Amino acid sequence: MSLTSCGSLPGTGGHSRTVRVWLMKGSASDEFIQQFTKDFESKHRDTRLDIRIQEWGGIGAKVNAALKDGPKTTGGPDVIEVGNTQVAMYADSGALRDLTLESVRDLGSKDWLPGLADPGSINGAQFGIPWYAANRVVVYNKDLFRSAGITELPRTRKEWIKDTEQLDQGDQQGIYLAGQDWYTLSGFIWDEGGELAVESGGLFTGALDTPAALRAMDFYRRLQALGDGPKNADEAHPQQADVFAGGNIAQIIAVPGTAQAIVKSNPELKGKLGFFPIPGKTAGKPAAVFTGGSDLIIPEKADDADAAVDVVEALAGEKWETELARTMSYVPNKTTLAGAVKGEEGTAAMAAGAARGRATPNSPQWAAVEADNPIKPYMTKVLNGEDPGTAAKAASKLLTDELVER
């Protein structure tokens, strides 16, 4: 699929250069892309945009090939949207343009969400420019909260556990939390001051067996027990939206867009779903959360790096960040733009959590970890009663082994 402008703009001598842009399927609507293209080309009359939509499946190999060969030989991109946790893998090849100067001078990097900015920064150089974020919140059934007499949403972990215990009665589940939802566990670990892995001298060591990480796993265990989520599966097996749609579950932890899938499965829940940030240890400070989303990168071999930078600066600038957030219900790349989604309950809850968002360890090997993730079976072992310290130590060793540079 390719979305491009048609020919040259009236009154111009034609486009003297073309910037090829790869965006991922589902990241932006057709209307957004068309409006952005029209606006950009009207302000850069010598530039034509060639925006092509890519599938997430198999994108890693495709991007690596484009970075290696360069646009001239492959017809590949000058600007690429990549997952925020993928930047380190691509930067490791030495094939990305250093955008540190533009980040500080033109893009206001001091206000970027850490969960997007940190993965794009390698050894002090900024290779990935934050584009948009999404993170988990608590999606809840307003009717079940009301029936349980809960009139104020929990703001601390202690209040959250108390309310969830009150909601977990009879056939009703206080919360549906799959046993291997490691994204949610990651947030609890960061909230305790721990890490998934720590880096020293360029080497990463698994840190699931630290006191902070063990406290997080214990809280996860207590919360998970207040429902019937499977101990040996993640949130996609089965899809938790489908389970929640049954109507007897008070809460799940998911991105706000999950509500659309819930209502589609059970239209009777329309207007009955609410959202709040995952509570932290103290009131007024939501829990740390895993921040998903996308960064924009420019290959070192881009045909026209200056024009590519113009495109990135426009996409990541205030005008189009605001438009994208409102159109797609995303969190914009800066904390200062959170007001753009203030009127949307789910997105506003997401933005509150995003201010404390984090990402996975900034290792080029992290993709290998997720392909065979030792955190998930570790969680199942603890939930099934195995000694947490012993299970965590074994999982940390596996993490360390997988994070060794190859």
Image (tube, helix red, strand yellow):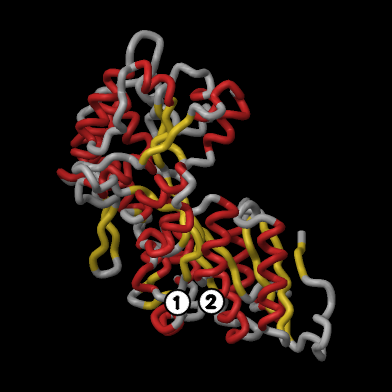
Q: Looking at the image, is mark 2 or mark 1 earlier in the sequence? A: 1
Image position of 44 with respect to 159: above or below: below
Residue 351 visible here: yes
SS for dot 2: helix
Q: Which mark is residue 107?
A: 1
Image coordinates of residue 370 in percent, x first then y, are 44, 48
Asked whether 68 or 212 is in front, the reply is 212
Circles 2 and 1, Cβ within 8 Å, touching? The answer is: yes
Number of marks drawn: 2
Q: Using a 10 Å C-alpha cutoff, classify the residue at mark 1 as few (fewer than 14 neighbours), some (14 to 19) or many (20 or more).
A: many
Left or right: 347, with 49 as reference point:
left
- Residue shown at the point (42%, 62%) measured from the top left: 116
Q: Residue 36: x percent and y percent?
A: 66, 68
For residue 244, which numbered disc appears in the image?
none
Residue occupying image coordinates x 63% and y 76% = 78
Residue that protrudes farthest toward the bottom in the picture? 13
| Camera-side residue of 174 and 60 | 174
Residue 100 image-quadrant placement: bottom left
Within 10 Å of disc 2 (Cα), the crowding (few <14, some 14-19, many 20+) is some
Q: Is residue 405 visible?
A: no
Q: In the image, 232: left or right of 74?
A: left
Residue that appears at 18% across and 36% down: 389
Q: Amino acid at mark 1?
A: Leu
* Residue 83: image location, x then y, percent: 51, 58
Q: Residue at x 65, y 84 (%)?
A: 303
Quarter of the image containing the N terminus? bottom right
**Considering the image in quadrants, where does the C terminus appear?**
bottom left
Residue positioned most to the left? 211
Three-letter residue code for mark 2:
Glu
Residue at mark 2: 313
Q: Quadrant of residue 85?
A: bottom left
